[in-house]
Amino acid sequence: MLLSALTGAATGAAASELDTPDDTTRAARLEQLCRDNFDFVWRMARHLGLPRADADDVAQRVMMVAASRFDEIETGKERAFLYQTTVFATMKMRRTWGRRREVLTEDFPEEAAPNAQPDELLDKQRAYADLRRILQKLPEKIRTAFVLFELEGWTLSEIASAQSIPQFTVASRVRRARQQILRHSTGLKQQLKGNLA
């Protein structure tokens, strides 16, 4: 439903009114962009500290912004655009928290993968809860660099390009995040050991 709404908004017409090849191609490209990146945007909102319900809202808003500004997004730089929009939307969402009366609480960790052994699940849940807790304490620039590099699999150059900073600055932030995370958590050392070469 969201995808068809975005497609209609981006083309300025309902999906049934798309009759030119250009409109159809554009709608298909927009739909593909949403399908390929919605989960990424949602995860980024979560990593930036939003609870599930707010992450859902931010992900939908980011996709609506992408739909309305689709022609402005450079080919090959879609993820950078979505990342920057997600950071902006997340900051805006946080500013609204002070005006709300509801109490934002959430139980961690998230549901585990099927067929895992109970002791493996417990170790992973503890490491995940540890990581979430520590990530929330990191300065935002360091946390974002770590999340994009270690959890989302972006390259240093992709992060540097998205944030308009030198690549060595990104590498320094990732290194500082690793040091702080490992300093504060013995449980994460085993989980992350293979990725710290």
Image (spheres, grey):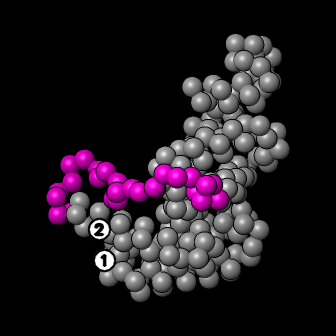
Looking at this view, name the residue that lies furthest to the front: 101
Looking at this view, name the residue that lies furthest to the right: 72
Residue 46 in the image: state x and y as whole percent. 50, 56
What is the magenta segment's predominant secondary structure? loop
Magenta region: 95-120
Per the rendering, the mark at residue 126 is 2
Closer-to-camera residue (79/3): 3
Location of mark 1 (residue): 187
Query: For the residue carrying disc 1, how many other residues have a C-alpha within 10 Å: few (<14), some (14-19), or many (20+)?
Result: some
Residue 59 higher or lower than 97, as above or below: above
**Mark 2 or mark 1, which has the lower sequence index?**
2
Q: What residue lies at 72% left-to-right and 36% top-to-bottom?
A: 67
Q: Please state which amino acid type lies under the numbered disc 1.
A: Gly
Closer-to-camera residue (192/147): 147
From the image, which quarter does the C terminus lie in? bottom left
Residue 193 falls inside the magenta stretch: no
The answer to the question of whether label 2 and label 1 lie on touching residues, with beta carbons closer than 8 A, is yes
Q: What residue lies at 42% left-to-right and 67% top-to-bottom?
A: 132
Residue 147 higher or lower than 183, as above or below: above
Kindly indicate the quadrant of the structure image that contains residue 64. top right
Q: Secondary structure at mark 2?
A: helix
Q: What residue lies at 69% left-to-right and 27% top-to-bottom?
A: 7
Residue 138 in the image: state x and y as whole percent. 53, 76
Q: What residue lies at 61% left-to-right and 55% top-to-bottom?
A: 99
Residue 18 in the image: state x and y as whole percent. 75, 16
From the image, which quarter does the N terminus lie in? top right
Q: Please state which amino acid type lies under the numbered disc 2.
A: Arg
